[in-house]
Image: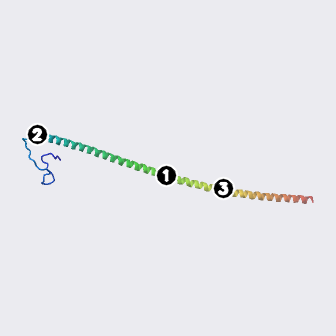
Amino acid sequence: MDIFSESYSPSIGDKEPYPAFETDRLDPHYDEICNRIEKLRYEVQEWVKSLNLRLEKTAQRAQLLDERSVIAAKDTHEKLATLYSKIKESQNSDFKFAALIERHNQIVQSFELRLTQSQRLIENQAVQLAKQQELIDDARRQLEKLKRL
């Protein structure tokens, strides 16, 4: 919308925002004022174009940043999913490892118990063997005595 065009009418209503004034074309400054107005109109239009270009560039940059942030968010989400998967796999491996260690400890304890029982059995049998040997020795001595008689 060009506010300096002849067809422009303010949307305020029938009231003029500024009081109307008569322009006198015979005024010696009339051409100078018209030139200044044209120059201002041109400058304002260039300024508006410049602002529109800046606004478009800013909008493009914002859209590019938005696209990059979406890509970065997806990438981060994928990396987190992979990381969570690896953590879960590691935890499962830790649980399996702990179960293996527990099973190993149970086997070791069972072996130690059997070893202790075997040692007691061997000790008991050694004591019994010693008693039996003593009995055999006593029996031989008595036989020797009996043979001498």
The amino acid type, in three-letter code, at marker 1 is Glu
Drawn side of residue 62 relative to residue 137, left or right: left
The residue that disc 1 covers is: 89
Residue at point 38%, 47% (across, down): 72
Q: Secondary structure at mark 3?
A: helix
The image position of residue 89, as x and y in percent, is 49, 52
> What is the distance, in whole Å, between disc 1 and disc 3 at their CAs?
34 Å
Q: Quadrant of residue 110?
A: bottom right
Drawn side of residue 74 relative to residue 111, left or right: left
The residue that disc 3 covers is: 112
Drawn side of residue 105 relative to residue 5, left or right: right
The amino acid type, in three-letter code, at marker 2 is Asp
The image position of residue 122, as x and y in percent, is 73, 56
The image position of residue 131, as x and y in percent, is 80, 59
For the residue pair 56 and 133, the one nearer the viewer reads as 56
The disc placed on residue 31 is 2
Residue at point 66%, 55% (across, down): 112
Residue at point 89%, 58% (across, down): 144
Of the image marks 1 and 3, the number of the one nearer the N terminus = 1
Q: Secondary structure at mark 1?
A: helix
> What is the distance, in whole Å, between disc 3 and disc 2 at their CAs?
118 Å
